[in-house]
Amino acid sequence: MGKILESLPLTIVAGVVLTIVMIIATEAIYDSQMSAPEAAVSDMMDNM
Amino acid sequence: MEMELFLIRYLHVISGIMWIGLLWYFNFVQIPTMPKIPDEQKPAIGKHIAPEALFWFRWGAFFTVFFGLALAWRSGYLMDALLLEEPNIGFGMWLGMIMAFNVWFVIWPNQKIALGIVEAEADAKPAAARKAMLFSRTNTMLSIPMLASMISVQNPIM
């Protein structure tokens, strides 16, 4: 981790990777909060 | 109520620009430039510019979090965000609070040693400077998802 943080470009790349991980985690949390009918509608909308 | 929320958000954003602007100044400008500055000119940074920048930096961090928490509380989503039931803003809030903790309890104490603001043994200064730099870089890394989280409240990413 220290090697990454010593390099500014690698720090930025790590920040972008963390952003992607955060987006995936956010989606997973929202999906887990949906009720079954809501999830079915969401799947249908995604497949349209 | 609308005026109150506007004012709190405005102060949150102004403090945030002060904080993250200086964080990026340190990481994109000052730290990479220091090795190129002649030794006789370095005290201008270490004795004058850096202490002043660190003053606005740490208070910018404090007031960004203060007004951010006030905004979440007055808007009624503070607990939902902190418990990640509203993860869009919740992740950003947690990242911001971790970053502010780093500023006040790691970066600032170590910068005081590195810049000679407090008494310390000579060999403690390089170690303190390196620790402050690494935590400053950590905050730069965390600022990227933190800002994405803050913006995604208005414009969802997915």
Image: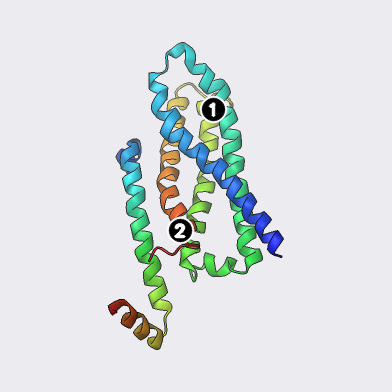
Judging from the image, what secondary structure is the residue with disc 2 in? Answer: helix
10 Å neighbourhood of mark 1: few (<14), some, or many (≥20)?
Answer: some
Q: Is residue B105 above or below residue A40?
A: above
Residue B17: quarter of image? top right
Q: Which residue lies furthest to the left in this view?
A: A47
Q: Residue B4 location, x and y as percent?
A: 71, 60
Q: Residue B12 location, x and y as percent?
A: 61, 51
Residue A36: quarter of image? bottom left
> Mark 2 highlights which residue?
B149
In-image side of A19 versus B88 (left or right): left
Q: Residue at left 64%, top 64%?
A: B73
Could you give the CA–CA distance between mark 2 and mark 1, rounded to whole angstroms? 29 Å
Q: Residue at left 35%, top 44%?
A: A12
Residue B130 visible (yes or no): no
- Between residue A36 and residue B158, name the one nearer to us: B158
Q: Residue B50 carries which label?
A: 1
Q: Residue at left 58%, top 26%?
A: B117
Judging from the image, what secondary structure is the residue with disc 1 in? Answer: helix
10 Å neighbourhood of mark 2: few (<14), some, or many (≥20)?
Answer: many
